[in-house]
Amino acid sequence: MFIFWFSFASILLIFLLHSLVKFFNPNPRKLPLPPGSLGWPYIGETFQLYSQDPNVFFASKQLRYGSIFKTHILGCPCVMISSPEAAKFVLVTKANLFKPTFPASKERMLGKQAIFFHQGDYHAKLRKLVLRAFMPESIKNIVGDIESLAVDSLNSLEGRLINTFQEMKTYAFNVALLSILGKDEVLYREDLKKCYYILEKGYNSMPINLPGTLFHKSMKARQGLAQILAKILSKRRQMKLQHNDLLGSFMGDKEDLTDQQIADNIIGVIFAARDTTASVLTWILKYLGENQSVLQAVTVRIPLSQFNYLDFLYLQSGDLENDCSWLLVLASQEEQESIRQSKEKFLRWEDTKKMPMTSRVIQETLRVASILSFTFREAVEDVEYEGYLIPKGWKVLPLFRNIHHNPEIFPGPEKFDPSRFEVKALIIIFLAEIFVV
Ligand code: HEM
Ligand SMILES: *[C@@H]1O[C@H](CO)[C@@H](O)[C@H](O)[C@H]1NC(C)=O
């Protein structure tokens, strides 16, 4: 009897001890957390981040702790990663272990069904549909129309003092609509633009949905956008025509997307495409303005009066020089020559492939400006990376800018030097391309 009682008590004790150990050490394999400091309870290192340039904050952390480190900002414990390999691990190879996280207000505004908020099969399907509409095969057909939009924009700038970013946003919006809705829907362009601009104004406002607030106006504008899209959808269904723009891709019979899913993703892609492209175009102008030798290498000057569709353009000199009667054509003399020889009335896809120098300027601008400094995810379970533990529920931030500005990968990282992209190998590390192209 005593023996029975004794063994029972021992088992209970062992069980209790085991639970206790587990309670205090949920990580039985004792993987360490990444290096770094979590700062004060709750507020963590939020002040340090907000009281200095965030790029300096991240860069000094990286210098001290290496390419993976922990911190605590805005109430969340985070792991920051700043090596290409780690970014690939989180965003591509082990994407299933890290889910996207956005504030609920952003989801409501862009639409819950939009690609950014999802993982798994639905995400993969949307990704396929978006890529299909932006593959060279599909884009090919609208290169000439994009050229016309660019020419119209430039003509509209003549003699005006402009805010470059604003003009680039208008241009990028028009190109986005063209690639999403094709040529037929110019009718709706102004209405869509009106709604979208209101939506955008409230995007970063306090999410209080009461009459009169910016957020409320944005939410209404969002409904407006959805209504216009519903009109376009029903028209297309009546006409029963095949379109190979993004809307056509979403509407495919096989895809089986609901109208709401289509609307959320159309709005989402406008959102993803417009400001990014407009920022990059604006930075290109700035960097070219600051480096005359690169500017000369990629431009040919043609008096506006002699401009015709045989020449093509991307940018205008308004901000760089006061003389608006010159167009800057973003292709070197040789690039221009080889294009001109083959060129018909409009610019063609093949022509854009003959502009290596121009491509390097774009790549280098994407690198130096790194317009999206980082993104974030949340670990859905405990994850091991390079011997460290990334605990379930922690945020994980791939720091694109730190990767693009790492002097070991890009010597003299602050310098705008397109010639560094003459070396092919470097392009692999260039992140934005992995996701977008
Ligand atoms: C040059 C400007 C652009 C830059 C720097 C850029 C950058 C990025 C980055 C870093 C992401 C990943 C975000 C994340 O997963 O957390 C992303 C996602 C995305 N971008 Fe862009 N982007 C640009 C232009 C565009 C354009 C023109 C489109 C139009 C098709 C677009 C559509 C998307 C979409 C649909 C996603 C979500 C992809 C997914 O969740 O799988 N982006 N972009
Ligand atoms: C301009 O760019 C060229 C080529 O990329 C580079 O060699 C040169 O040092 C740059 N000049 C300045 C002032 O940054």
Image: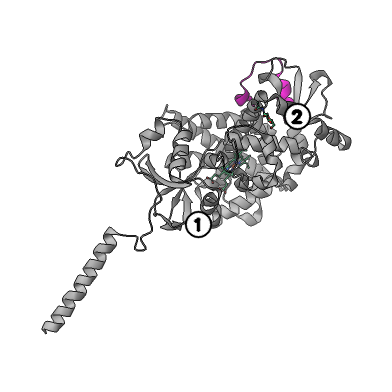
Q: Is mark 2 within 8 Å of ligand 2?
A: yes
Distance (Cα) linking label 1 and label 2: 44 Å
What amino acid is at disc 1? Asn
Residue bearing mark 2: 297
Q: Residue at the spot x=41%, y=29% of the render?
A: 211
Q: In x, y percent, where is residue 296?
A: 75, 26
Locate residue 263: give its quadrant.
top right
* Lateral position of residue 33 relative to residue 232, left or right: left
Vertical arrangement, residue 87 with respect to residue 19, above or below: above
Q: Residue at the spot x=34%, y=63% of the render?
A: 28
Q: Residue at the spot x=26%, y=67% of the render?
A: 18
Vertical arrangement, residue 289 with respect to residue 144, above or below: above
Q: Nearer the viewer, mark 1 or mark 2?
A: 2
State yes or no: residue 170 in magenta. no
Residue segment shown in magenta: 150-168
Q: Is mark 1 within 8 Å of ligand 1?
A: no
- Is residue 383 among what the camera can see? yes
Rendered-image quarter of ligand 1: top right
* Relative depth, front residue between 292 and 342: 292
Q: In x, y percent, where is residue 51?
A: 39, 30
* Relative depth, front residue between 319 and 268: 319
What amino acid is at disc 2? Ala
Residue bearing mark 1: 96
The prevailing secondary structure element of the residues shown in magenta is helix
